[in-house]
Image: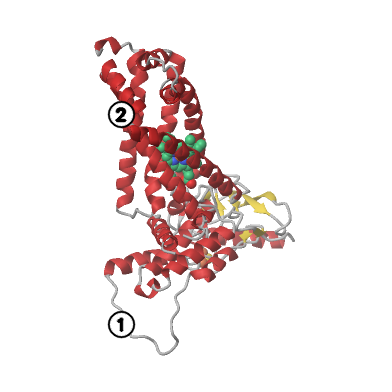
Amino acid sequence: MKLKLKIWRQKNAKAKGGFETYDLEGVSPDTSFLEMLDILNDKLIREGKEPVAFDHDCREGICGMCSLYINGRAHGPDDEVTTCQLHMRKFKDGDTITVEPWRSAAFPVIKDLVVNRYAFDQILQAGGFISVNTGGVPDGNAIPIGKEDADESMDAAACIGCGACVATCKNGSAMLFVGARVSSLAKLPQGKIEAARRAKAMVAKMDELGFGGCTNTQACEAECPKSISIAHIARLNREFLCAKLGD
Amino acid sequence: MSNIFSSSIGKKLIMSISGLFLVVFLLLHVSINFTAIISEKAYMAACNFMDTNILIQIMVPVLAAGFAIHIIYSLIITMKNLRARPVSYAVGNEAKASSWASRNMFVLGLIVFGFLALHLTHFWAKMQLQHFIGGHPEEAYKLVKELFGTWYYAAVYVVWVGALYFHLSHGFWSAFQTLGTNNSKWLPRLQCIAKVYAVIVALGFVSIPVYFLMGLDPLFP
Ligand code: HEM
Ligand code: FES
């Protein structure tokens, strides 16, 4: 395949970035998108140029480290996959591909296509956990949990924290991420104890870090690589409002 | 309750409650309007009810406050949301992921507001307000017939109804989502009810100028 790549280049957080165009030839349709960037970087290094910085880790769609806004969509044109699971066969020979970093006030660009997603960690630290006593491993099934609750919780727990929701939302809102985390814990007996405190703390942190609010556009759900439903945002609203009104 | 309204979700709570309040008001308003089609007598009776009923008198300032709150908070929320996305994408593809109405609630709201101002000066100030201040109300049916009989007034009105339709088709279900009274099962149901509600309101409002422009009024005196 022959490709024209329009890639956002930015030296550091303070620098003013811009698009650079690169031509790449001989790309197999079976390479993954990140492998294609590896090929480009290899070429750039050989030419004595600075390679393109981008985030990645597991490359098997489970860690949430890869990002990239490709041709106007978070994680590119394929549905329900991360960028590392996207393959070049989803593009056509001769295509121009525009690659941008996530854009959100809460996710500042560090370099090229790499953004700082530490804000998500801060939200988790504010309440995305349960407190347990240390000791031996508890018996499996010691606490019975209904099938439906377990399923709901697991669906929400599928969130890999990649930030595609924030990148896609026109308000740069983190409500799907926070909704998934609050929801997955609120559905389980272990998470119920701290549920009220958790919802309040995580929402307060989210607001403080400069994420926007939810206007229920559903764009996050459509672009989430794990197809997390906005039903979890409704549950977050419910948990938060009940917690606040109960104060 | 502590500082609930300083949070993003608390502000949306205000939007949703004021929005749903306006939703109920619109249903009442469109029903009253519709009596103009039934007959002049029915319309005059409805107007008389609106001018004299004590509950309505109490609700008028509450309604004004509802509008004010909805509009003020829409500004606050929209400003904050714009700040959260300071740099936009070179290539966007939003149409794929979200409905047009949901992305343009503020602009749609502004169009609704624009007509609201026009409407207040043309109708309300000459009808109900005159009853409240003891002035000389105009003859309601005649006023309606006259204004809606003019094509450009009717045209502006139709644009307004269009904006209102889109605002409601998203706003109605969105309010329930905000209140947390939504889940995977109810989402499609609420979205369907929202469409039905928006269609009823839009058709109800549009029917009035159509009725007068087409000169159908002598058929139902
Ligand atoms: C009769 C008139 C109106 C009705 C029935 C109405 C109803 C609603 C409803 C039910 C919502 C959904 C609330 C939510 O998502 O929780 C909404 C949202 C909204 N309304 Fe209105 N509205 C009206 C007029 C206006 C006006 C005049 C403006 C402003 C100029 C406005 C601006 C907005 C905005 C910006 C939103 C989106 C807020 C958000 O999603 O965060 N609306 N409206
Ligand atoms: S690199 Fe781990 S999800 Fe893509």
Residue B31 has which mark? 2
Residue A189, can we see it? yes
The residue sitting at 37% across, 49% down in the picture is B176
Reading the image, the residue beneath label 1 is A142
Tag 2: Cα neighbours inside 10 Å, few (<14), some, or many (≥20)?
some
> On what subunit does the disc labeled 2 rest?
B
Q: Quadrant of residue B147?
A: top left
Name the residue type under label 2: Ser
**Along the line of sight, the residue nearer the viewer: A46 or A21:** A21
**Along the line of sight, the residue nearer the viewer: B126 or B190:** B126
Q: Height in image: B166 above or below A5?
A: above
> On what subunit does the disc labeled 1 rest?
A
Q: Quadrant of the C terminus of chain B?
A: top left
Report helix, strand or loop for mark 1.
loop
Residue B101, can we see it? no
Q: Quadrant of ligand 1?
A: top left
Instruction: Tell me where residue B60 appears, x and y as whole percent.
Output: 41, 34
Name the residue type under label 1: Ala
The residue sitting at 29% across, 12% down in the picture is B217
The residue sitting at 30% across, 29% down in the picture is B31
